[in-house]
Amino acid sequence: MCPRGYDIPILLYHKVALTPPPGNAVWVSSELFARQMAALSACGYVTVSFQDYLAYRAGTAEPPPHPVILTFDDGYESLYTTARPVLDRYGYKATAFLATGYIGSTERMDNQWDPSEAQHAVPMLLWSEVAAMAADGHAFGSHTRRHPYLTATNEDRARQEIEESAVALRAHLGAAPQVFAYPFGDGAGIPRIEALVQQAGYAAAVSTLPGVANTLASPIWALPRLRITEADTPGPGGSFLRRLGCHAPLPPADAELGGAPETDPWRELVLSNRCPHQVAGYQASEAGGSEASLLVSHPARQQALQLNPSAAVIWGLCDGQRTVAEMAGLLREAYPDQAAAIDADVLQALLALTEYGAIEWT
Ligand SMILES: [Zn+2]
């Protein structure tokens, strides 16, 4: 085992929606979520479970080179409808912490515990959807029954909340949950609450304390997580991959490309990857280069994207043999007067095409 333990970033999501209300830290737009998952995949991240984490911690297994745990708190319908198809695209598996008292059997409930969300009640999962995701390999943990502040609750009631959600999960999924998440993060680091969680039979608990979890250093009853918000963009200069600690090495042949700082992890991974394309068609603009149309092959639909001329030329050149850096070099020859803009265009285009599933990174 690594003497310093292994870093395993645990990402914290709540709701994923097409148009999140502005200024809310518990929503991520579906567009950004798709870009974040594409960036994770491009950077080589693979999802692991808490069962895996416990094995790394016990020294009975070793993590892959870029492990990540994706968690979703509360149990919103959008996990099933919006996040799941994106996760499926990359073979990613999530762990959702359910406030089980709000998971319906026949009638869908909403998040009525949260007064700040009263104007826009958010629908929760159904047990049938939970079971379908569990059958697909996603994991479920406990987030109490009714989502209370545990430190403001008397001990009997707190114990009930912590135990009964595990009973509900076992009844619906056939196995007791291993991991607990404190509602509002309240109770993490408080010995009397952590003791209740331990006594209820859980093996670990996650907090909302910020940080990258480590297999040796992190407290098992208050594992830190990285709360992901709309501010965590994966593109050049964005914080998303940097917060996870993604630093793919830059190959020497690409070093002469100027522009963005070399420490930008997204730039590094773009320059060090090849892109075998799956483009259905390429059509240069009749207007002579100000715009070009791409027909991008997508599993669900044929989508025409309007991209800048550099992006279109990349597509024309991309044959799965050249690296992105080599393509950028050819672009510079083709458009010497636009050389300064080409790096930015290359990144932008690849990001957009990755998001649409048009590029498979190798
Ligand atoms: Zn919650």
Image: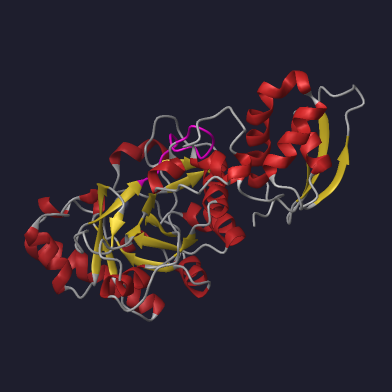
For the stretch drawn in magenta, the main secondary structure is loop
User: Which residue occupies 52% across, 46% down?
Assistant: 36
How is the protein colored in the picture?
Answer: secondary structure
Q: Is residue 158 visible?
A: yes
In the rendered image, which quarter is residue 240 located in?
A: top left
> Is residue 239 shown above or below 50?
above
**Residue 61 is a magenta residue:** no
Extreme residue in the top direction: 337
Residue 110 spot, x, y in % from top left: 40, 51
Judged from this view, the residue extending furthest toward the right is 286
Q: Position of residue 233 (x, y in %)?
A: 49, 37
Q: Which of the 4 image quadrants contains residue 25?
A: top left
Q: Between 290 and 4, which is closer to the camera in this rendering?
A: 4
Pick the residue in front: 13 or 353: 353
**Quarter residue 253 falls in:** top right
Residue at x 20% of width, y 57% of height: 222
Q: Position of residue 312 (x, y in %)?
A: 79, 35
**Residues in magenta?**
227-238
State the residue at coordinates (72%, 41%): 326
117 or 64, which is in the foreground? 64
333 w.r.t. 241: above or below: above
At 50% across and 49% down in the image, what residue appears?
A: 248
